[in-house]
Image (spheres, helix red, strand yellow):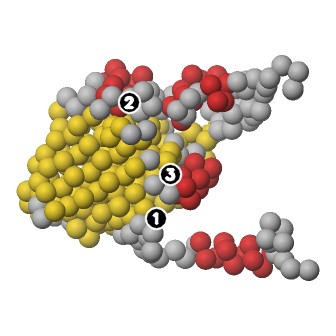
Amino acid sequence: MARVRYGARTEAEIAAARTAAAKLPYIWSTGLVAQWETDPDALAAVLPAPLKPTGRPLVRVNISRVDLPGHPLGAGSFAVAASHAGVDGWYPLVMPMTHERALICGREVFGEPKKLGEVTVERDGLVVHASLARHGIAFVEVRGAVSGQLPLPGPGRKTDFYFKFLPAVDGSGFDVDPVLVHCLRNEKVRRLERVTGEVVLRESMHDPVTDFPVLRLVDITIGEKTGDQRGKVVERVSAEDLLPYIHQRYDDPRQILDAPPEGRA
């Protein structure tokens, strides 16, 4: 009988896949990063416990083109500064991806708030432009001109905070207690330039980023970087505390709050 491809993999095949995943080559990306100070009350309002605001109400947008062999990936992140247990990092609110593979892996393994979207990074000489779009709306746009080289930073580490959870089958709460994940990223930069420009935020009911206005633009840069990431569960969190925030993950939160139709339990 021909092999049934949905059938179980052998132990040797599982081990080979795990070994291959552990030896991924460095993959470089080109991206624009913009940071600004925003309304501190708005920032604090989106942080589920036990996350807390840092001493500075920062927003960070990263819009990148990842040089995957044969099939480049557009990857974005809109995140606010947050702190947990003495660690300062970033709490992403939405992470548009152009490939389903990147979306599923990040969301199911780490709990990342990834959604399919359009991610654009363009450069024409000194002129640069990048955007994040979903449902026909470019809700974030970064544009400007390269205005000089910046010194290359040494290898650095960045921490992102994610909540990993499973909505309950019956539409009430979660199947198991949610967990808080620290995602540690080790990054190397091989090119970095300053950009003089602006950040444009557009109203979208699905991605309401205009709640975080640009009160003071800190910087815009364009660069090339690579890195790796490792996640770890640091604690279980209160389902009651997290439940009011899970709409951040979905375009229509009713999808996960609906009970089964009557008579079809």
- The secondary structure type at the circle numbered 1 is strand
Q: Nearer the viewer, residue 137 or 171?
A: 137
Is residue 57 rendered to the left or right of residue 104? Answer: left
| Residue behind mark 2 | 204
Q: What is the three-letter code of the residue carrying label 3? A: Cys
Task: Note whether residue 194 is visible.
Answer: no
Tell which residue pokes out farthest to the front in this image: 136
Is residue 113 rendered to the left or right of residue 236? Answer: left
Q: Which residue does the image show at 57% across and 48% down from the upper left?
A: 107
Q: Which residue does the image show at 79% across and 25% down from the upper left?
A: 260
Q: CA distance from mark 1 to mark 3?
A: 10 Å
- The secondary structure type at the circle numbered 3 is strand
Q: What is the three-letter code of the residue carrying label 2? A: Ser
Q: What is the three-letter code of the residue carrying label 1? A: Asp
| Residue behind mark 1 | 228
* Residue 158: x %, y % from top left: 39, 53
Q: Which residue does the image show at 59% across and 53% down from the upper left?
A: 104
Q: Quadrant of residue 190?
A: bottom left
Question: Mark 2 Cα within 10 Å, few/some/many (few <14, many 20+)?
Answer: some
| Residue behind mark 3 | 183
